Amino acid sequence: MKKLNKKVVGAVLVVGILLTAGLLMQNKNKLVEVEVAAAKKEHIAEYVEELGLVVSETKGNVFAPAAGKVTEVMVEVGDQVEKGDVVAKIDNQQLASQLMEMEAKKAAIMAQYNEAVKPIDRKEIEKLELQLGTQKKKVEEAKRQSEIHKTLFEADAISYEEYHVVLLSEQQEEARLEAINLDLELIKKPISQNIAASYKAQLKQIDIQMEQLRKDGQNYVVTSPLRGTVMMKTAETGSYLQPGMQMMEIGDAEALYIESDVLVSEIAKIEEGSKVEVSHKDLGISGATGTIRKIYPKAFSKVSDLGIEQKRIKIEIAIEGKIEGLRPGYDLDLKIIVSSKENAVVIPENAVFEKNGKHYVFVNEKGAAALREVQKGIESRKKVEIISGLSEGEEVILSPDEKLEEGILIHTKEMV
């Protein structure tokens, strides 16, 4: 009986060894190689990426104050100017012509007034009538010449100055005709006190107009509206300007800020005071920061590079510190921080997957894959904060696939 018991025990032991060996072989066949990463505590931030444009804090446009040809430009792009410095001069030929015209008109009225107070002279009347007929022909010829020169000017066959001279000649001939008519009327009847007062009023009005023209002459010397650097220049010597045309832009190259615009769908995350990371790889700018100082109240439409119309909100960013080599007009890469957290438990985002509306990770538990439900927080730069379900130091499996199951044995390699 004892011998039989020994045989049974021996057989059981052999079976046990075979079963254990079989299980080991089975688990070996199911062993899966995975890449893992340890959960770490670190700073994490969520941000909105946009492009920004560097703008001068103080800038002003210089506009042409009057029509005319630019005779001289005193500055070049990059030059420093003070407020009131002369930056350009415009030919005052037109002003001189207007003054000459007013002088001629004044002399004509004065002559008419002097003639009006003379006694009636029949011979003088006949003389004026002859002059009147001759002057009418001159006016007709002057108008004909004006029409011819107008056609030539519109066809770019002559300059504006040449056309203007002909126009001035026509006006002068008409003024002489008017003067002869008035002389003829006055000589035919004695001048009254009212007519004398009218002459004096006309002369006074001409004096006022001439004074205003002389004041306007100061506009032909163009000055800088502020202290700064010439950023852009469109007026060159010899170019012809019309009133209101932009001649140059002057700004402060040292006092700078950044303008950008954000999608309306993302503006709710952003507020004044939000921090901004500023960089530009080609310009060697990194580690610079700024702060949003202004969010504009009104949205505007903008077409993206892909041709999609978007609603955006303009923002202004104050630059913190000094960024070497920065110039107005530069484009910069911006990362607007919308939320951040220190000492957050962070893992790579490709360790997390969604199932039935919940988020999970596989954790390395003593060489086996363990499914763990987690709650996500901030997501940024291919990393994600884990609020609950995971502790610092625990290893998560990266990019889990369909081969991975709860409890399966794993062979790990650290993420590089």
Image: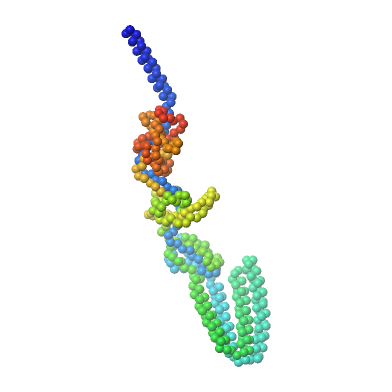
Q: Residue at x 48, y 55 (%)?
A: 299
Decide if residue 372 is in sight here: yes
Relative to 291, does residue 115 appear above or below in the rendering?
below
Which of the two residues, 141 or 2, is positioned nearer the viewer here?
2
| In-front residue for pair 112/329 | 112
In the rendered image, residue 363, in percent from the top left (x then y), is placed at 39, 33
Residue farthest along the left direction in this orientation: 2
Q: Quadrant of the N terminus?
A: top left
Quadrant showing the C terminus: top left
Nearest the viewer among 306 and 285 is 306
On screen, residue 80 above or below 109: above
Q: Residue at position x 37%, y 31% from top?
A: 365
Residue 113 picture quarter: bottom right
Residue at 63% from the left image edge and 86% from the top image edge? 184
Q: How is the image coloured?
A: rainbow
Q: Position of residue 410 (x, y in %)?
A: 40, 29
Q: Which residue is drawn at 51% across and 54% down?
A: 301
Q: Where is residue 45 in the image (x, y as percent from the top left)?
A: 39, 45
Rendering coords of residue 94 (x, y %): 55, 73
Residue 290 visible in this rendered orientation of the protein: no
Q: In this view, does 331 lie above or below 205?
A: above
Q: Residue 19 lies in what quarter of the image?
A: top left
